Amino acid sequence: MDNILATMSVSVTELKRNYASIIKDADDSPVAVLNHNRPEAYLLPAGHYERLMSYLEDLEDAKLVRERANGPFVEIDLADL
């Protein structure tokens, strides 16, 4: 059995029939879209998606910081800038 990674789920048919209502009921949470009782897709409200992308960007930045923490470093003089 597949894990459903959302607190709300709908069938593809229900999504087609009641799209606006489902978006409203989801509030700001993801919705699992099921096809034959298996997750086919996830519907993410725009705000949730934007926060997710921002979080991923932060994780990538943190990884770069860790990778570059021990150098090599380039010495510069502020007067040269």
Image (tube, grey):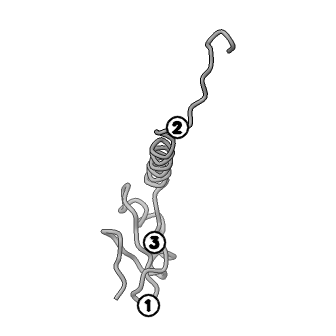
**In what element is the residue under mark 2?**
loop
- Tag 1 residue: 36
Q: Earlier in the sequence, mark 3 or mark 1?
A: 3
**In what element is the residue under mark 1?**
loop
Residue projecting furthest to the top: 79
- Tag 2 residue: 71
**Front label number (2 vs 3):** 2
Do residues under tags 2 and 3 come within 8 Å of each other at their CB atoms?
no
At horizontal 46% and vertical 57% (from top left) the residue drawn is: 45
What's the residue type where badge 1 is placed? His
Quarter placement of the N terminus:
bottom left
At horizontal 47% and vertical 48% (from top left) the residue drawn is: 63
- Tag 3 residue: 18
Residue 25 against residue 57 in the figure, above or below: below
Q: Position of residue 33 (x, y in %)?
A: 44, 76
At label 2, counting other C-alpha atoms closer than 10 Å, the crowd grade (few under 14, some 14-19, many 20 or more) is few
Q: Earlier in the sequence, mark 1 or mark 2?
A: 1
What's the residue type where badge 2 is placed? Gly
